[in-house]
C-alpha cells in the first residue's frame, strides 16, 4: 500500500525557517517525481514544487521561488521542503503528493495527510 | 503561468442529480488536465486524469471531457458521498495550476 507521511509542520515566526519531510513507503520511491501542494485555511489548492525522479528537473511556484528548496533522499525514501523567509501567507496545510504517469500524461495519484504550517508572531 | 478558471464556485444539488463543473484554461493545454475531489479535513483524491481517463477505483458516475481550453467534470446520479469540493489541475506545463474549486452542497 502506498503511504506518504508528512512531518515537520508547526508554528514559526515571520522570517523564520522550517523543514518539512515526507516519508514514502509501498512503492519504488526513486522511480517517481514528488510534489508539494499547499492549502491555506479555507482556501483552494496551490501547487508548490516538484522534484523529478532523475533529479534533473526541479520546479517551483513563483510565490515560493528563492525562499523554498525541495530535495529528496532516495536512500531514505523521503522528500523534503526547506522553507526560509516565511511569511504569514505561507500559512497552510502542506501536502506531499506522488506524481504518476500514463503515457505522456502526469497526475498526482497519492497524497499524504498533510502537515500544518502556521506563520505568526 | 496558465490560469484555470473553474465554475461555478459552488452549487446546490440533490441526490440523484446530474452535476456539471467546468474549467477553462487561459491557453491551450491539450488534454493535460486532472480532476480532484476533496472532503473537509482530508487530502485531495484523484478522480480523472488526461481530461477523461477514470482513475482506478473511482465510480463510473464520474466522467471528464474536453481538450484544449475547455473541460468538464460530470457526476451522474449524485450520491451522498459526492458532496465535496472539486478542483481541476493543469499539468501541461510548470507551474502547475489549480482551478479555484467548486463546492458541491446538498440542496
Image (cartoon, rainbow, N blue to C red):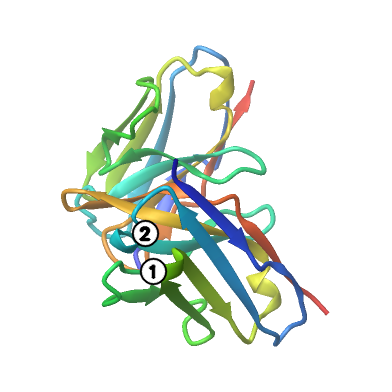
- Name the residue rendered at 66%, 68% in the picture: A8
Q: Which residue is mark 2?
A: A29
In-front residue for pair B66/A49: A49
Q: Which residue is mark 1?
A: A74
Q: Earlier in the sequence, mark 1 or mark 2?
A: 2
Determine whether, in the image, residue B79 is placed left or right of residue A93: left
Q: Is residue B13 visible?
A: no
Q: CA distance from mark 1 to mark 2?
A: 7 Å
Residue A102 spot, x, y in % from top left? 21, 46
Determine the residue located farthest toward the right in the rendered image.
A121
Dots 1, 2 in contact, CB < 8 A: yes
Quick check: do tags 1 and 2 share a chain? yes
Figure check: A63 above or below A112: below
Residue B10 spot, x, y in % from top left? 57, 37
In-front residue for pair A101/A119: A101
Quadrant of the snapshot with the N terminus of chain B: bottom left
Q: Quadrant of residue B26?
A: bottom left
Determine whether, in the image, residue B89 is placed left or right of residue A7: left
Residue B4 spot, x, y in % from top left? 39, 55
Residue A49 spot, x, y in % from top left? 44, 70
Determine the residue located farthest toward the left in the rendered image.
A103
Figure check: B25 above or below B56: below
**Alpha-carbon neighbours of circle 1 within 10 Å: few (<14), some, or many (≥20)?**
some
- Name the residue rendered at 61%, 55% in the picture: A114
Q: Which mark is residue A15?
A: none
Quadrant of the snapshot with the C terminus of chain B: top right
Number of marks in the image?
2
Determine whether, in the image, residue B30 is placed left or right of residue A22: left
Q: Is residue B42 visible?
A: yes
Amino acid at each position: 500500500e502506498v503511504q506518504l507521511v508528512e512531518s515537520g509542520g508547526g508554528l514559526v515566526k515571520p522570517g523564520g525557517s522550517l523543514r518539512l519531510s515526507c516519508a514514502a513507503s509501498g512503492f519504488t520511491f526513486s522511480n517517481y517525481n514528488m510534489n508539494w501542494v499547499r492549502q491555506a485555511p479555507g482556501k483552494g489548492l496551490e501547487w508548490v514544487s516538484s522534484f523529478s525522479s532523475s533529479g534533473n528537473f526541479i520546479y517551483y511556484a513563483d510565490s515560493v521561488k528563492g525562499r523554498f528548496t525541495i530535495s529528496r533522499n532516495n536512500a531514505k525514501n523521503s522528500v523534503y521542503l526547506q522553507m526560509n523567509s516565511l511569511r504569514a501567507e505561507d500559512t497552510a496545510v502542506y501536502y506531499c503528493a506522488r506524481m504518476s504517469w500514463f503515457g505522456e500524461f502526469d497526475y498526482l495519484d497519492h497524497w499524504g495527510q498533510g502537515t500544518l504550517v502556521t506563520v505568526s508572531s | 503561468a496558465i490560469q484555470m478558471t473553474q465554475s461555478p464556485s459552488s452549487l446546490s444539488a440533490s441526490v440523484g442529480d446530474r452535476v456539471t463543473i467546468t474549467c477553462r484554461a487561459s491557453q491551450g493545454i491539450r488534454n493535460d488536465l486532472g480532476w480532484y475531489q476533496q472532503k473537509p479535513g482530508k487530502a485531495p483524491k484523484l478522480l480523472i486524469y488526461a481530461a477523461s481517463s477514470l482513475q482506478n477505483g473511482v465510480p463510473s458516475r464520474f466522467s471528464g471531457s474536453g481538450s484544449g481550453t475547455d473541460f468538464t467534470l460530470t457526476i451522474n446520479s449524485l450520491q451522498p458521498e459526492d458532496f465535496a469540493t472539486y478542483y481541476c489541475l493543469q499539468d501541461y506545463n510548470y507551474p502547475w495550476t489549480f482551478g479555484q474549486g467548486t463546492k458541491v452542497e446538498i440542496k
